[in-house]
Image (spheres, rainbow, N blue to C red):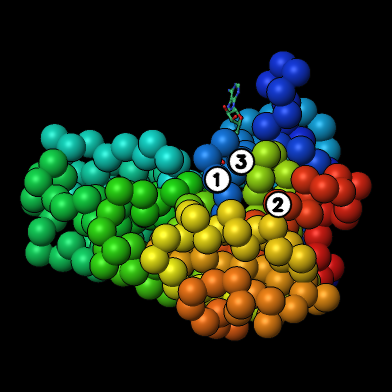
Amino acid sequence: MDYTITTSNLTKTFGSFTAVDNINLNIQSGDICAFLGPNGAGKTTAIRMLCGILEPSSGTGSVLGYDLLKNAEFIKQKLGYMSQKFSLYLDLSVRENLDFYAGIYRIPGKIRRRRIEEMLRLAGLQGRERDLVANLSQGFKQRLALSCAIISDPQVIFLDEPTSGVSPAARRSFFNIIQEEAGKGKTIIVSTHFMDEAERCGQIAFFNEGKLLALDNPDNLKRNAIQGNIYKIVVENPVHELDKITGLPGVIDASLHGRSLHVLLGPQGDVELLKNSTSSVPELIEPTLEDVFLALARRRGRKSHEPNFIGH
Ligand SMILES: Nc1ncnc2c1ncn2[C@@H]1O[C@H](COP(=O)(O)OP(=O)(O)O)[C@@H](O)[C@H]1O
Ligand SMILES: [Mg+2]
């Protein structure tokens, strides 16, 4: 199969520290792949290598058929990249910002005017092109930043935590735009902390401590990563109950999710025992992506020789 993005044991070390550790990615055209993981997991470093900005320490990879090591300069021109610190010019207008980035990508005059109009529409900023960027809401700023990053109409788009600091409504509308772009066949990598955003992506790459724990679609991840059942228990004093439940036979893990507990009961576990040990009734639930992440990270911690992927 032809993948738009593929890597083999891609690794980045900084001195003796390994920031990205032998990752193997295969991402198809038209996919949205979420890079999901805690701070410091290696998401940004992986993205920067895939964009041709950072030289890999070892391993190989290609984007759009171009080799990450040999054709980095070429790859850079072919991509749209919205970095974590993507900066707009606050003292310039909306249109001036778009025009500036169109200039960087050397988009010729006639196409440039059309693309700027398209990007104004995409950002929802038609009629506001003369507004100073400083006066835009955070949500509009992010959408304008995306518009600037993809004004050259790239086939592959990297978005590094594009929605941090924006409202939930603005996050949703940002994701609608991303999904529209993917619908046109664009391949999109988007890093995020937000499980609800990852849930809307066709693929999820779970990162932890530089390693890729899994790469699969959300449904497969939920089906395959969890061995046992997840029970939700809403209790008055979750911290106190957590201690009690963690020690029960058959309980593989228990964790706090807001005001409730999620208990992973292994295949041999006894739900009656669980019922008798808490003040409220355990409810069998579909695993959330958080449950999946915890299960994968736990398994990785226990047996470091396990393969990188599940379902592959
Ligand atoms: N230039 C660098 N020099 C040294 N360490 C770095 C450098 N860039 C990133 N790191 C380290 O690599 C790890 C992964 O960072 P990063 O890729 O930014 O993670 P994430 O984007 O998932 O938060 C972190 O521990 C970070 O401190
Ligand atoms: Mg980052």
Alpha-carbon span between mark 2 and mark 1: 11 Å
Earlier residue among tags 2 and 1: 1
Does label 1 point to a residue whose CB lies under 8 Å from ligand 1?
yes
The image position of residue 106, as x and y in percent, is 41, 43
Q: Amino acid at mark 2?
A: Ala
The image position of residue 214, as x and y in percent, is 73, 59
Residue 303, compared with residue 287, is above or below; it is above
Earlier residue among tags 2 and 3: 3
What residue do we see at 67% from left, 39% from top? 209
Q: Quadrant of residue 229?
A: bottom right
Alpha-carbon span between mark 1 and mark 3: 6 Å
- Residue that numbered label 1 is attached to: 38
Mark 2: few, some, or many residues within 10 Å (few <14, many ≥20)? some
Q: Quadrant of residue 211?
A: top right
- Image quarter of the N terminus: bottom right
Q: Which dot, 2 or 3, sits closer to the camera?
A: 2
| Count of marks, rendered view | 3
Residue toward you, 205 or 148? 205
